[in-house]
Image (cartoon, rainbow, N blue to C red):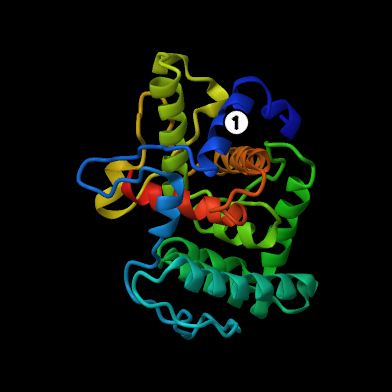
């Protein structure tokens, strides 16, 4: 399915509704025992990351011979501006290393490791060993997704696609207008579409359009049970890279359309700020 096909009918209607929320209409978000946000920009103002102080870069160790970029440290619960500065550095260094092709695999892997580290997903049982095993082929992996994405379709043709909550952070910095689609953002999108359909339109949840039944992702820690607002409606994706990619692309299109319809909303300077508000909402879902 291409962008025009997706952004039609009821998806377009939801994009209109979301655009009005970017322009200040209330969302009345609440979840038991957590913060509530009357407006979407309240969630943006509350943005904080990470939950614990984070060293500038992952610790170098034998077997991980990457060349990391220079990245400032992040204090616990750093605000949006501080995180934006770190991400701007990571994006610049990622694109620079990527533009060099296959000539500098240790520099490219060093930036990707730093992005994983920023996102809290440089884990010993997941992204860390995968990167070590694949760092020499990393440019090929990223190039494959970039080319696949340029086809303008929400399906992937890549066999053995690497796509998870860690890699979506990498792709979001590599590809223009590609948001992070992790468990928090997915949960927030699902909550918003559920509210639009059930509360505002007063329709049965069973009739929610399939194209708006955003795939949710398993969370970690104490919030893990709450990263899906309605498990009977929204599928929880588990180790399904193709479906994760599909919903990420659809979310890119939807948020891009809503942002365009909102016509330069006062409280949201760019698409990444919308993503950040959803991230903060999803922390509480």
Q: Is residue 42 visible?
A: yes
Tell me the SS state at disc 1: helix
Q: Is residue 68 left or right of residue 152?
A: left
- Residue 228 coordinates in the image, percent (x, y): 36, 37
Q: Please identify the quarter of the rendering in which residue 227 is found.
A: top left
Residue visible at 73% across and 26% down in the picture: 5
Nearer-the-camera pick, 100 or 77: 77
Read off the residue under disc 1. 16
Residue visible at 46% across and 52% down in the picture: 277
Residue visible at 38% across and 45% down in the picture: 218
- Locate the C terminus by quadrant: top left
Q: Is residue 34 left or right of residue 143?
A: left
Q: Is residue 277 left or right of residue 232?
A: right
- Locate the N terminus by quadrant: top right
Q: Please identify the quarter of the rendering in which residue 263 is found.
A: top right
Q: Please identify the quarter of the rendering in which residue 69 is found.
A: bottom right
Q: Is residue 212 above or below residue 39?
A: above
Nearer-the-camera pick, 147 or 137: 147
Nearer-the-camera pick, 268 or 183: 268
């Amino acid at each position: 399915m291409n962008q025009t096909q997706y952004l039609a009918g009821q998806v377009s209607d939801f994009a209109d509704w979301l655009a009005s929320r970017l322009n200040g209409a209330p969302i009345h978000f609440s979840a038991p025992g957590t913060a509530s946000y009357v407006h979407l920009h309240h969630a943006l103002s509350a943005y904080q990351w990470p939950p614990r102080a984070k060293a500038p870069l992952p610790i170098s160790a034998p077997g991980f011979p990457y060349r990391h970029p220079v990245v400032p440290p992040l204090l616990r619960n750093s605000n949006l501006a501080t995180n934006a500065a770190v991400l701007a550095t990571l994006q610049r260094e990622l694109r620079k290393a990527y533009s060099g092709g296959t000539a500098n695999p240790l520099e490219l892997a060093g930036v990707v490791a730093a992005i994983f580290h920023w996102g809290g997903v440089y884990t010993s049982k997941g992204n860390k060993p995968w990167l070590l095993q694949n760092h020499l082929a990393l440019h090929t992996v990223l190039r494959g997704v970039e080319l696949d994405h340029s086809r303008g379709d929400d399906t992937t043709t890549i066999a053995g696609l690497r796509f998870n909550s860690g890699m979506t952070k990498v792709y979001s910095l590599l590809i223009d207008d590609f948001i992070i689609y992790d468990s928090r953002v997915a949960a927030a999108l699902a909550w918003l579409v559920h509210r639009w359909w059930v509360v505002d339109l007063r329709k049965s949840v069973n009739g929610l359009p399939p194209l708006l039944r955003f795939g949710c992702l398993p969370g970690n820690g104490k919030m893990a049970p709450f990263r899906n607002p309605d498990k009977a409606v929204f599928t929880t994706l588990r180790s399904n890279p193709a479906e994760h990619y599909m919903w990420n692309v659809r979310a890119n299109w939807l948020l891009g359309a809503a942002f365009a319809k909102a016509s330069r909303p006062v409280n949201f300077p760019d698409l990444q700020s919308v993503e950040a508000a959803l991230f903060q909402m999803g922390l509480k879902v």
